[in-house]
C-alpha cells in the first residue's frame, strides 16, 4: 500500500511538472520568440486599411460583388473554425454537380464563352477551405466584369491588367506551388486605379 502511494505521488508530481513545462513554459517561450522575430505573422498577418482590420493575408474571404475579384470557393463558407474540405471524392455525383454549378456561375458572371477553360481553383475548394490565393489566369478572366462594374475606361482596364501582373507571385522558392495572387490584397489595390 505504501509503494502504491509513493508511485501515485511520483506520477502526480511528474504530471504537474510536465504540464507546467509543456503546457505553460514552452508555449510562452515559443510565442515570445515568434513575437520578437515575426510580429506580423505571429499576430495573424492582419491587413489594415484606415486603421481598421479588413482581413488576413493568409485566410480567404468571400467576395461576390461584380466590382471585386472573386475568391476561391470554400467548403466551409469561409468559416475558420470548421475549416476543411467537403470530403466528397472524385466519383461523387454531388461534387460533380457543385463543380458544374460553380463553373456555370463563373462563366456566366464573367460573360465568358462556354468553351472557356476555367481554372481549377475557381471551381474547387482547397483542402482548408480558406485558401486566399487564385491564379493570375483566374484574375485575368475577371477583368472585363470588374471593369464594367466599376465603369473603367480602356486606360483603367489596362491599369488593371498591369496591377495583376505586378501583384502576381511565383512559386515559393521557385519550385513549390504555382503562380498565385492574393485576392484580398488585389481587391484592396483596386482602389488605387483612378
Image (spheres, helix red, strand yellow):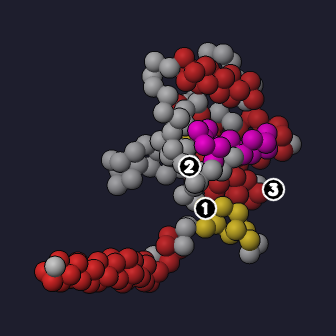
Marking on residue 22: none
Q: Is residue 145 visible?
A: yes
The mark nearer the N terminus, 2 or 3, is 2
Q: Quadrant of residue 158?
A: top right
Q: Quadrant of residue 23?
A: bottom left
In this picture, residue 25 sits left or right of residue 125 = left
Q: Residue at x 63, y 48 (%)?
A: 78
Q: Which secondary structure, mark 1?
A: strand
Q: Secondary structure at mark 3?
A: loop
Q: Are marks 1 and 3 in contact (CB under 8 Å)?
A: no
124 up-or-down from 150: above or below: above
Q: Is residue 77 or residue 47 the one in the foreground?
A: 77
- On screen, residue 128 versus residue 153, left or right, reads left
Residue extending furthest left? 3
Residue at left offset 66%, top offset 23%: 101
Which element type, helix, strand or loop, lies under badge 2?
Answer: loop
Q: Position of residue 7 (x, y in %)?
A: 17, 79
Magenta residues (range): 63-78
Q: Position of residue 142 (x, y in %)?
A: 69, 36
Task: Please state which of residues 113 and 23 is positioned toward the viewer in this rendering.
Answer: 23
Amino acid at each position: 500500500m505504501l509503494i502504491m502511494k509513493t508511485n501515485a505521488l511520483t506520477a502526480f508530481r511528474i504530471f504537474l511538472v510536465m504540464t507546467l513545462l509543456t503546457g505553460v513554459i514552452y508555449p510562452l517561450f515559443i510565442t515570445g520568440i515568434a513575437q520578437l522575430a515575426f510580429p506580423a505573422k505571429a499576430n495573424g498577418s492582419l491587413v489594415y486599411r484606415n486603421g481598421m482590420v479588413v482581413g488576413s493575408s493568409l485566410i480567404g474571404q468571400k467576395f461576390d460583388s461584380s466590382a471585386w475579384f472573386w475568391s476561391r470557393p470554400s467548403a466551409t463558407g469561409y468559416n475558420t473554425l470548421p475549416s476543411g474540405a467537403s470530403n466528397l471524392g472524385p466519383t461523387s455525383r454531388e461534387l460533380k454537380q457543385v463543380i458544374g454549378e460553380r463553373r456555370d456561375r463563373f462563366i456566366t458572371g464573367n460573360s465568358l464563352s462556354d468553351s472557356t477553360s476555367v481554372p481549377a481553383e475557381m471551381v474547387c475548394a482547397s483542402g482548408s477551405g480558406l485558401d486566399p490565393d487564385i491564379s493570375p489566369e483566374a484574375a485575368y478572366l475577371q477583368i472585363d466584369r470588374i471593369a464594367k462594374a466599376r465603369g473603367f475606361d480602356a486606360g483603367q482596364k489596362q491599369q488593371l491588367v498591369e496591377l495583376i501582373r505586378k501583384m502576381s507571385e511565383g512559386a515559393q522558392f521557385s519550385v513549390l506551388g504555382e503562380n498565385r495572387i492574393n485576392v484580398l490584397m488585389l481587391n484592396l489595390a483596386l482602389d488605387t486605379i483612378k
